[in-house]
Structures are given as structure tokens and as C-alpha cells.
């Protein structure tokens, strides 16, 4: 059942190793699952949805640690990918039987695996617009198919069964170990270099962007089933529509431009979802967010690469800054959601819009790269 998204990706014949392709697809399923688990875990452990949001924060904390540190202490190698996939398998499978406190620790371990996989995937294509599209499109395609499946499994079985399914899904990338070779290790220098000031500003902006976005997105399912009045199944279908909207923008192979404007589109979409509690507004916001996000992120990566002396070194750094935003986002979102969805939408939207402003300024002052290493 969960292999369907992988088959859909293979049909597109992307120009990335199959190991990277499938590992990234599995990671996307893990991330897709989190918003749908909030309500079920709150009922299972008899705690508030705001506290359950900590599973996202701890998972993303692990993501920060690995995506930030991997590029500093590791070289992109196939065995590193295998170790990350195996760690993800163990962390997800054992999450099915854990109490809440142990679950948080296991989600941290899952985040370490996810961050390592993301670092390897983006390091493989960073600075190459055509191949960036091959990695970027994985998210919306997998999300399109996975959202209703995830919602159905959780609704019919429960969170423990969902975690068992996620653990089993990690077997798929291991089938491609012998046939895949990573080339990014040949391009990345052994020594590390400090980012330029402009590159640092771009990475901070990416962190603020994901902070505001994750603060809202982690509660979109709760908003849909709460003030908007949708059923869980209907909400999952809207999540699929959100992913479908991102396919053409993620797959786009031309020059990635206008990062600031596309970030502004996602900011408006996030605010609409949280503030205007009407099914049509919710659907429109999710569609705009899906399309705008996958135009915004690769365009922002292009801005970062243009302002980096060694672009490939910034691949893991960018993921880490974005992950730091996602760590803080659910915690901030939980506090704001308790106050009210409208407050959440206003604060989240403004944070995202401020990041768009920084990207717009940087895009007007391109700096030639001194090296492609």
C-alpha cells in the first residue's frame, strides 16, 4: 500500500540515485504522518493536542542535529544513507509500543535519521536546478498519495499501527543499496568554510519561514476538523490536493526565481487557513500553499547558492536552519492555537512574510559564486 508513492516517482525517471529517491520518499511519508497523529495520540495518552505537538518538535530537533552536524563530520557516502535508513526503521517500529516520554526520545532518533537523509539528498543535487527539481518533486508526489492512506490507517487502526507501518516502509530503500552510488562526495571538499554574510541572512530567513509555516501547518488538520467542520477523511483529501498543487512547481526545471514573492504567497495562504474558517477558503489556502511552497523553497535555495562561495557546503546548513524553524514552530503554534486560530494565522503569516522580504532583497543583489565545490 505505501509502496504506491515510490512507484509513482520511479515512473517520472528522475536523475537521482534510486537509494536517494526512495529514502527521501520514505522520509516524506514520515513527515506527512505527523499532523494526522495529533488527535489520535492526544486521545491515546489522554493529553492536550498542544502537548502532542512536542512529537514534531523533538523529531525536528533530531533533524537539526543531524542535518547541521552531518556535513561537518561526515562525507556523503552510501553506507551513511544505509545507517540512517536503519535507524529510522528501528525508531519508527519501536514507537508503536512506547509511552509518551519514550516516544519523544524515539521521535528525536527518527529526526536524526530524517536529517541525515535530507542532507545526503540535497547535497547530491544542490546548485543544479534540473536535479533540484528531481528531489523537490518527491515531497508533493508522495504527499498526494500518502495523505489519504495515512489518514485511513490511523482512523481504522490507530497510531501504534501507523508507526509499525512506517518502520516496515524503511525496507524499501535498502533494496536499492547495491545499485546506487552517491556522487556528491566527489564534489564536496574535506574542509569547511564559513558562510558569507548574505548566505547567512538567507539561511536565517529560511528558518523564520519554516518557523511560521510549521506553527500553522502542524495544526491544519485540527483546524479543518474543528472550526472549519470537515471530517477526517475530507481533510486528508484536501492534504492530497495540497500536495498535487505542488507537483508542477516542484517539477519545474527552469531558473528558480522570485523566492520572496512565492514565500509571500504561502504566508497569505497560511493566514487564510487559520483565520477564515470556511471550507472553500481552507481548500483554496491549501492549494496556494502547496504550489507556492514548492516554488519558494527551490528558489530560495538558488538565492542561497548564488550568495555562497561553496554552495554544496550550504546544503546541510540550509536544511538545519529550516529544521530549527520547524522545531520552534510547533511549540509556538501550540501556544498560539490555545489562544485562538486567528492569532496563530496572524503571527505565522507575518513571520513567513518577513522571510520573503529578506529573500526579495537578496535576490536583487546577486553575488557570483567563486567555487562550485
Image (cartoon, rainbow, N blue to C red):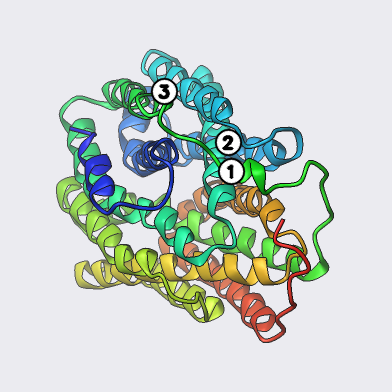
In this figure, which residue is indicated by the disc labeled 1? 119
The crowding category of the residue bearing disc 2, from other C-alpha atoms within 10 Å (few below 14, some 14 to 19, many at least 20), is: many
250 relative to 360, above or below: above
Q: Is residue 25 left or right of residue 264?
A: left
Image quarter (top left, top right, bottom left or bottom right) of the C terminus: bottom right
Residue 170: percent from left, percent from top = 37, 26
The disc at residue 92 is: 3
From mark 2 to mark 1, how far is it between C-alphas?
A: 5 Å
Residue 180, by quadrant, is top left
The crowding category of the residue bearing disc 1, from other C-alpha atoms within 10 Å (few below 14, some 14 to 19, many at least 20), is: many
**Can residue 236 be seen?**
yes
SS type, badge 2: helix
The disc at residue 107 is: none
Question: If you read the primary sequence from the N terminus, does the residue marked by circle 2 or circle 3 appear first?
Answer: 3
From mark 3 to mark 1, how far is it between C-alphas?
A: 20 Å
SS type, badge 3: helix
Question: If you read the primary sequence from the N terminus, does the residue marked by circle 3 or circle 1 appear first?
Answer: 3
In this figure, which residue is indicated by the disc labeled 2? 116
Amino acid at each position: 500500500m505505501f509502496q504506491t508513492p515510490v512507484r509513482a516517482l520511479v515512473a517520472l525517471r528522475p536523475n537521482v540515485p534510486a537509494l536517494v529517491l526512495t529514502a527521501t520518499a520514505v522520509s516524506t511519508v514520515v513527515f506527512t504522518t505527523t499532523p494526522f497523529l495529533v488527535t489520535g495520540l492526544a486521545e491515546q495518552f489522554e493529553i492536550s493536542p498542544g502537548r502532542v505537538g512536542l512529537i514534531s518538535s523533538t523529531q525536528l530537533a533530531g533533524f537539526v542535529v543531524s542535518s547541521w552536524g552531518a556535513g561537518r563530520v561526515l562525507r556523503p557516502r552510501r553506507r551513511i544513507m544505509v545507517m540512517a535508513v536503519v535507524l529510522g526503521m528501528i525508531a519508527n517500529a519501536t514507537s508503536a509500543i512506547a509511552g509518551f516520554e519514550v516516544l519523544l526520545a524515539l521521535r528525536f532518533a527518527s529526526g536524526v535519521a530524517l536529517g541525515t537523509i535530507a542532507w545526503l539528498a540535497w547535497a547530491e543535487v544542490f546548485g543544479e536546478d534540473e536535479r533540484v527539481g528531481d528531489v523537490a518533486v518527491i515531497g508533493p508526489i508522495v504527499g498526494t498519495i500518502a495523505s489519504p492512506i495515512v489518514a485511513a490507517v490511523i482512523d481504522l487502526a490507530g497510531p501504534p499501527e501507523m508507526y509499525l507501518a512506517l518502520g516496515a516502509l524503511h525496507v524499501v530503500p535498502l533494496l536499492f543499496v547495491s545499485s546506487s552510488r552517491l556522487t556528491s562526495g566527489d564534489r564536496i571538499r574535506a574542509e569547511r568554510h564559513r558562510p558569507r554574510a548574505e548566505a547567512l541572512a538567507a539561511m536565517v530567513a529560511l528558518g523564520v519561514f519554516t518557523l511560521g509555516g510549521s506553527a500553522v501547518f502542524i495544526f491544519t488538520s485540527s483546524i479543518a476538523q474543528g472550526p472549519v467542520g470537515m471530517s477526517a477523511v475530507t481533510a486528508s483529501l484536501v492534504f492530497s490536493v495540497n500536495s498535487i498543487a505542488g507537483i508542477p512547481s516542484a517539477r519545474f526545471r527552469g531558473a528558480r526565481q522570485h523566492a520572496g514573492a512565492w514565500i509571500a504567497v504561502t504566508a497569505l495562504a497560511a493566514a487564510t487557513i487559520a483565520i477564515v474558517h470556511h471550507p472553500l477558503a481552507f481548500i483554496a489556502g491549501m492549494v496556494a500553499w502547496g504550489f507556492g511552497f514548492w516554488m519558494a523553497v527551490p528558489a530560495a535555495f538558488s538565492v542561497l547558492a548564488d550568495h555562497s562561495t561553496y554552495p554544496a557546503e550550504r546544503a546541510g546548513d540550509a536544511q538545519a536552519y529550516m529544521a530549527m524553524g520547524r522545531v520552534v514552530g510547533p511549540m509556538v503554534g501550540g501556544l498560539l492555537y490555545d489562544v485562538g486560530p486567528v492569532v496563530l494565522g496572524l503571527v505565522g503569516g507575518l513571520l513567513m512574510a518577513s522571510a520573503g522580504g529578506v529573500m526579495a532583497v537578496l535576490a536583487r543583489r546577486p553575488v557570483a559564486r567563486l567555487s562550485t565545490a
